[in-house]
Amino acid sequence: MKLHISLWLCVLSICVSFSQTQKDTTHTNRTQLPEVIVTGNTNTDPTFNTVKNDYQKKGTQPKNVADLFSEINGFSAIKRGNYAIDPVFRASAYEQLNVIYDGGTKAVHACPNRMDPITTHVIPEEIEKIEVVKGPYTVRYGATFGGIVNMVTKDPNKLEKGFHGKTSVGYETNGNALVSLIQLQHVSNKFNLIGNVGYRDFDDYEDGDNTTIPSAFRSTDYGLKLGYNLSENQYIQGHWRQSFGRDTKHAALQMDTEFDNSSIASLDYKAENLSNNLKSITAKAFYSYVDHLMTNENRPNFNMVFASSPVTSTTIGGKVETHWLFNQLNLYTGVDANLISREGNRTRTIKMMNGNMLDEPIIIQDKIWQDAELNDIGIFTEANYQINKTTFTAGLRVDFVNADAKDLEDDFASHYGNNVSKSETNVSGTISLKHKITPKAILEVAFGRGVRTANMAERYINHFSVGQDSYEYLGNPFLKPEINNQFEIGFKGYSKLNNTNNFSYQFSAFYSVYDNYISAVVDPSIPRKFMSTEEPLYTKVFTNIDDAYKTGFEFMVKFDILKDYYLKNESAYVRTKNKDFGESLPLNPPFNSTFSIGIEKELYWAKAQYNITSKQSHIAPSFGETETAGYETFDVKMGATLFKNFTLGVACLNLFDETYTNHLNFSYRNQADFDMSPITEPGRNFTAFLQYKF
């Protein structure tokens, strides 16, 4: 690990030294880091992107960053409680989505059941906007299978100069939830410094039937960001953040989180306008560490067995990229790396056997991650070229992957052998075009080939329940990488009806052909390892399937009326098929549509939103999925600047107190008062969020 860190710091120093030898012939504003993917430049932005950027203005206190996705068309969420929430986009989830912070920083969960997904390690109030690339349509940000999600924090160079800050506090009635944040910042021509501290305390919530759902959690977070302008065309920035989760309940998992501590450090550098053709050199290095402990101390089976699982995850990575400009050709070339390692065992203290208490408990250790490593080093080049009203983009990427586990469990080694190391060379690419049909309308067409190597759980998990069903899962270290061949066509634009009324629209339709899709099948020759007499009796083994696809569409229409008022509809549909099994792929969200009416004034805003989610009958029975009923909810949100620098946002979510469950929610596990049915969502919830800026 020290070698990898030294390597990236060395590359960073070489970039600085090189840029300092270049003569600066152009006076520019302060250099901006490439933390954003979508800049607003139609010619260089990726095809089929979307941006959600009003979080700072309209905060209604999300529980964690995953809640920020709820108003982005096409997104759903996998829920195991009120904290461990994973975003899903177009039925792509987990590592099928390339989820990053600030253009490339990553933190990888330590828990095999994803109690600590990447969305839990950043303060939601830090996020300025979320950028989404809807498929494998760029190769510049790491290996991408189903799309990119970039969570962007505030750029200090865009803040007002001098000493400023903000403080906020929020409250929710359903769950007696409290959130608070204080941020201080100093910005000058030469340097900037931002520091923040946040605290969140959520109790159990109630669904629409007043049933209390185990969902409490607490978290404390802080972050420091320091930037320095080395010269007019050079900027360097360091970012350090830590998050401390405590006493987190997971209604749909076998255990709860005692603590989840994460540390993330990143160092970014950019030099621009280096010559007539070399526009910029950027470099990023990052490190993240997650220390996680889960136990069953507060679960019904604690009297029979005490289980404790301390696990850790370390991620080291970075990127160096050059940007060249030759007339109308923008050319990006670079190299990036993501090096992941995980460790951890489960200790079981067995107190009861065959219904009888033991005089002396039996202590057994089970290897969770088997000291696994997964390293990916990629090289890429991407170019876009403009001809009149059309911009062409093409990119090629090669990833060199090496995976291994160095401390194998005996039964895992007996099944696969003692050498489970595997190397891959994965080639992905994209080609797309944007054509301005009129000055106010754009046609987009894209093809992308995204390749995803198997994750650590799919490779090395050994008889642990990591799915939405009750099966034990066995990893397969020799899985082939899965491939997404995605085609998409779309239109977007706007029309000015008159001086006060506008009409805007977006539509896109996509089709994906999957090769070697990674799934899991029951192997009757491998019995259940733990509690062997309980159903299901056999184990699921990860495998590749031959024939699967995905198709769907999204559309949006919006009428802006009398400048400040609007009517809006957004809808999304996705359909997946596993032809090998004759069923849907798992975690296929149902059709969703929202209708909203609102007003946007400088000093106040308001929105009422009607949410419709259809019944989901396209399911994967082999993964324990059952049909879920459709539901409708109604939300009201509003906010105002009360007086200078004070803003207040209030909301009533699920106004009519509906009882419902999202199709992607996991089912209750190891809970005294619940059967194996999917988690229900919160009932009526009043929220208030007060913010003061100075």
Image (cartoon, rainbow, N blue to C red):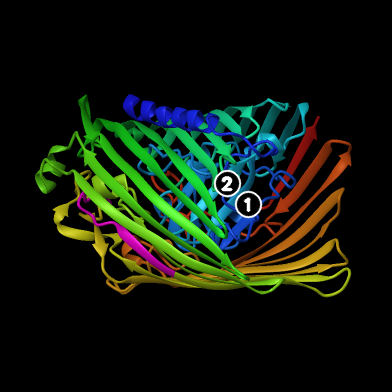
Percent position of residue 154, x then y = 65, 38
Q: Amino acid at mark 2?
A: Asn
Front of the two marks 2 and 1: 2
Tag on residue 276? 2
Residue contact at pointers 2 and 1, CB within 8 angstroms: no
Percent position of residue 493, x then y = 69, 70
Query: In whole angstroms, how far apart are the C-alphas of marks 2 and 1?
Result: 22 Å
Tell me the quadrant of the picture where the N terminus can be found. top left
Asked whether the viewer can see residue 576, the reply is: no
Residue 338 part of the magenta segment: no
Q: Helix or strand or loop: what does disc 2 sit on?
A: loop
| Residue 308 falls in image quadrant | top left
First in sequence: mark 2 vs mark 1: 1
**629 above or below 378?**
below
Identify which residue, 113 or 451, lies in the foreground.
Answer: 451
Q: Amino acid at mark 1?
A: Thr
Asked whether the viewer can see residue 562, the reply is: yes
Magenta-tinted stretch? 472-486
| Residue 588 falls in image quadrant | bottom left
**279 above or below 224?**
below
Residue 476 part of the magenta segment: yes
Decide: few, some or many residues near mark 2? Use Cα within 10 Å; few <14, some 14-19, many ≥20: few
Percent position of residue 280, x then y = 54, 42
Q: Helix or strand or loop: what does disc 1 sit on?
A: loop
Identify which residue, 558 or 20, lies in the foreground.
Answer: 20
Identify which residue, 389 or 593, lies in the foreground.
Answer: 389
Question: Circle 1 sits on which residue?
Answer: 39
